[in-house]
Image (tube, rainbow, N blue to C red):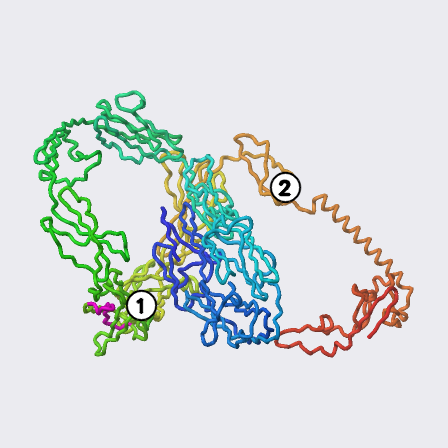
Amino acid sequence: MTCEAKGNPKPEFWWTKNGEEFDPYQDPRLIKEKNSGTFVIPNTGNLTEYQGTYRCYASNKLGTAITEEIEFVVPHVPKFPKEKIDPIEVEEGQPVILECNPPKGIPPLQIYWMTIGLQHIEQDDRVSMGLNGDLFFSNALEKDSHRDYCCFAAFPKIRTIVQKNAMSVIVKSTNSIMERKPSLLMPSGVKSKTQLVKGDELLLECIAEGFPTPMIEWLKIDHRLPDRVTIENHGKLLSIDQVDEDDNGKYMCKATNIHGKAVHYFDVTVEEPPQWVSEPESQLSMIGSDVLINCSATGTPQPTIQWMVNGKPIEGMFSVAVYQCEASNRHGTLLANANIMIMNLPPMILTEEGLKYSAVEGKVIVMHCKVFSSPPSAVTWNKEDSTGSVVGPRFTVHQNGSLEIYNVEKEDMGQYTCYTKNTEGTSAITALLDVKGIQLNKRQHFFNTLLSCLAVYDNSFSGDFEIVWEKDDMEIALNHTENSGPFGKGLGQIGDWSVYLTLSTEFIIEYEESQWEPGTWRELQRVPGNHGSAVLKLYGHVDYRFRLSGVNTVGRGRPSEPTERYKTPPAAPDKNPENIQIEGHLPHEMDINWEPLSPIEHNGPGLEYKVSYKRQHVEEDWQEHVVKRHSFVVKDTPTFVPYEVRIQARNHQGWGPEPKVVMGYSGEDFPSAAPDDVAVEVMNNSLVKVSWTRVHKDKLHGHLGGYRINWWRLRSLLDSKKTHGDKHTLTYPGDRNHAMVPGLTPFSEYSLIVMIFNRRGNGPGSHAVNFKTPEGVPEKNPVFRVTDVQKHTVTLTWAPPLEANGVLTGYLLEYQLINDTEEVGVLQTVDISNPDTTTWVLQNLEAISRYKFYLRPCTRVGCGPRVSKESTTTPEARKGNWNISEAVNSSKTFHVIEGLELGTVYSVTRAKVRISTQGWFIGLMCVVALLTLMVLIACFVNRNKGGKYSVKEKEDLHPDLESQGIHDDTFCEYSDNDEKPLKGSQHSLSGQIKAEDSGDSLVDYGDEDIQFNEDGSFIGEYAGRKEKKVSMEVKGTTNQSTA
C-alpha cells in the first residue's frame, strides 16, 4: 500500500480502512517503511483479513492531503457447487439449453464445453455457446444424445481450471420434426438496454431456436453498421472494439427461417468516467479577498462533485488548509488536492542583492527581481542618475518583476534599484549593469582551403566569446581546439579563427537488420582513415545491410548508400546469458532468473537454455533441465544452503561456450531461535541499554537482517494494576549484541522482548524481561487558570499533570509584576508542599496591576516544565445597589445588559429563579387539582349506580357471551375470581376470543407453531393446552360459541 507525500513541516501519515482508523504500526505482521506512509502486507496466508477499502492521509499543521480510495480484494479459489444434475430429455427438433453458471473469480474468465474425454463440443449455426457460458441447441437432433457434457471454467490469472459435473442429454427420435418459426433464446424480450464505458468492447448477442435452424442478421437503425464491427460465433455475436460516442444508437438482430422471423432491439449507450475540465489549483491569497477554487469535470453520466477539507466534509472555512475535490460517477472517481493559504505577507525579494550583469551594445539584457508577497506587489525599476522609474520603448518590466532592456546602449551602464511594495510593506535590491562594445573585422584568405575570421573584443568577455561559422545560412558544428587545427585562436584582444577542410581520419561502419529492428541503424565497427577494407564480426542467421560514414576533425559526414542485403548462415550461440540472479522466496524453493539473449544473439532458430545446479561442497552430480524461458524454479531444496548454478545457451546448430559457475542460496525460512541472556541496563529515566547473546547462524535459516526489540509499558509505578500498553518496535540492522531503547516514560514498569529477523521475516521472541525506569520530573500541568480576580487577591486553579513521572511532592508557584514597562517586578515564589492542592489564593497584590503567574509540578527529583498565565487586578470597587434583570430562559448562554456608565466597574451574578414562585406555575397546578377532583367525583357516582345489582346475581351469571351480554353499566366493575374474565374484555377486533383456561400457559398467548429456544427447552411443555382452546364468532347481534 503505497503512500508518499512531501511538505514543510514534514507530514505525518495515517490510514483508514472501511471508513475507520487503521494503524499499520499496531500490526507487527505488516512491514512499514520509514519516513513514508507505505506499508507492505506480506503473503503469509492471512491476506483475507486485510480485505477492505483503504485511504491514506498525510497531515501537517498546514492541512491534510488524501489519496483516492484503494480497494484490496483477495479472491477465493473458484469452485462449482456440488450438485446432482438430472438428465435432460427432449424430443427431436426442440431447443435445449445446458446451463454452466460458472463460479466467480478473477477475470478474465474462459469457458469451454467438452466431453469427459476432453473432446470439444462441435459448434455451428445450430449449436453454440453464449456469453454467459451456457450451451444452446437451436433444435436438438438424435446425434446430440450424450451423457458427458462438461462445462470447464478457466481463470488464467490464477492458473486454475474447474469442471462442473457432467450433464446428460437424451433426445427422443420422432417420425417427423415439427417445423416452426424462430424465437430468441437469448436475449429475452423485444428490446434491452446496454450501457458501457468508452474504450470498452461492445458485445451484442442473439441466439435463436427454430426449425429449420434460423440465420442471424445485424442492423443499426437509421445508420450503417460501423466498419469496426466484427460478426462472430456463426453470426450470433456482434462486437465493436474500443467503442466511442459514435457507437451510440439502436441496433437490431433478426433471426429468420422459411416460416418467419424474430427480432430484438438493443439500445446502446456509451458512457465515460470522470475527466477533469478544471482541476483545482493551490493558491496564496490575501486576507479579505475572495478565493475561488475551480473544480469541474465531465463524464457520462455527469459526475457529482464533493468537497472536503483536510480529508473531512466541509464544516467551516479554514485560512490554511488542503481542500479536496472529488468527482465521481458510476464508472470512476477523480480526486485532487489544493493547498489554500490565506495570509498577508510583506514583499520578500528572492533575487540576490548586488548582482552584476554584463551586456554588449545593441543586444538585449534581462535583470531579475523575483518577489514573493501577499497581496501581489507592484514592482518598479530606477536608475541611480534618474529621478523616476525607467521608461521608454527600450524598457519593459515583466510580470515576474524582471527588467528587460532592448538594443543596449553605453548610457545604460550603471546601478539599478528594484522597488517592491504592497499593503504590508516594501523591499528593494540593487543591480549593476556593465555595457561593453565589440568590433568584427572580416578577413578571407583562399589559399590551401583556409578560411579565417579576425575579431576584436573586450578582455572581460573572454569566457563568453564565441565565433559561429555558417555555410549557406546553416550553422557548422565545429570541434573547438585552441591554437591547433582546425582552429587557431589568438591571445589578448585578437581572436583569429580559421577552418581547414581535411580528409577523413576514421570510418564508421553501421548495420541494419530486417527481422527484429528493421529501419534502425546501429554502429558495428570503427576503422582507421587510412584503411580501405575491414573484416566484420557478425551474428548468425541475420539478414544484414551496411553503410559507411567518414569522420574528420570537423565532424561526421553523411553516410554512404546502403549495400545489398547479406544473410549470414545460422551458427551455435557465441555467448551465454548474463546477470544470473538466485533467490529464494519460499523455504524449500530456489528461483533462478537470468537476462535472456537478445534476438540477434540467438545466431539461429530453436534457442533454449540448459540450467545446471548442484549443492556446493557436496559430492553429487549436476542436475540439468532444458527450458525456453529465462527463469527456472528448483523445488524441494533444503532451507538456505549454497548452490552452484550455470546457464548454457544452445540452438539447432549446437551449444554455446562453456558457462561460468555462479553461487547462490536456496529459499530462506523464519529464524527458529530467539536471542538468549537478554538483559536491561537502565541508563537514565528514559533510556535503557539492552544486551543479548547472538543467535547461532545455523538457527538463522537465511541472510541476517538484524535484530528487533519490541517493548510495551505495563504500568506507572504509582498504579498497582498492570495493563498491556501500546507495543513499540525498533529495528537494528546487522550483527550486534546490544542496542539503546530511548523515549521511555519515567517511573514506569516496562516489558520487552528481542528477536532476530532475516529476509523471510521475524524469528521467535525471547523471554520477556521486565524493568523499571527511575523517577523523573513531571509533565506540565494540563490546566492552569485564573478563576477569581479582586483588587488585592487572585485565585489560581490547576489540574495535576497527566504523567507525574514519580511521586508528586507539591508545586512551585511563582509570580511577578509585568506592567507595560521595560522593567518587571521581582519574581516571588510560593512553595506548595501539599500535592493534592489544586487551588491557591495570592494576597497582598497591587491594585490595577498586571501579573504573570508560573506553575511547576515537582517530584523528589525536581520540578517539571512550567505553565504561565497573565491577569490584571481590579480597581477599588464602588458600592452600589443590586439591579435584577427579567427572568432569562435557561437555554440561553448570554444576556445583554444596557444602560451602563463608561469607566465604571460592575459586579454581575446570576441566581436561579424558583419555579414555585412563578405565577404561571401556580395557575397550572390549580387547573390540575381541579381536573383530578372532577374525575374522582365521576368515578364515585358510577360506583353507586352499580350497587343495585346483588352480588349473588353476578356470581350466577354464565361466563359465555350470550348470558353475560354487553352492557355499558359494567364500567368500573372488576372480577374477584381469577378464572372469570373482566366484563367487557371479550370484545375482540377479529370477532374471536379464547376461553380463559389458564393464565400461565405461554402457548395460549402465541401462534400454534411457535418454537422457542434452539435447545428445545420449551417445546412440548404446553402441548396439551392447545386442545382446550375455544373460538367464538360474533355475527350481527347473535352471539354463538362453538368448541
Please identify the residue farthest to the left as the structure is shown.
448
Q: Nearer the viewer, residue 880 or 108?
A: 108
> Which residue is located at x 39 percent, y 68 percent?
44
The image quadrant that residue 577 belongs to is bottom left
- Image position of 567 with respect to 506: above or below: below
Q: Looking at the image, can residue 830 be seen?
A: no
Residue stretch in magenta: 640-656
At which x and y percent is residue 887?
A: 65, 41
At which x and y percent is residue 87?
A: 57, 76
- Quarter of the picture containing the C terminus is bottom right
Could you tell me what secondary structure mostly forms the magenta stretch?
strand
- The local secondary structure at tag 1 comes to strand
At which x and y percent is residue 106?
A: 45, 64
Q: Which residue is mark 1?
A: 756
Instruction: Give yes or no for contact between labels 2 and 1 (Cβ–Cβ under 8 Å).
Output: no
The image quadrant that residue 661 belongs to is bottom left
- Image position of 928 with respect to 497: above or below: below
At which x and y percent is residue 934?
A: 82, 53
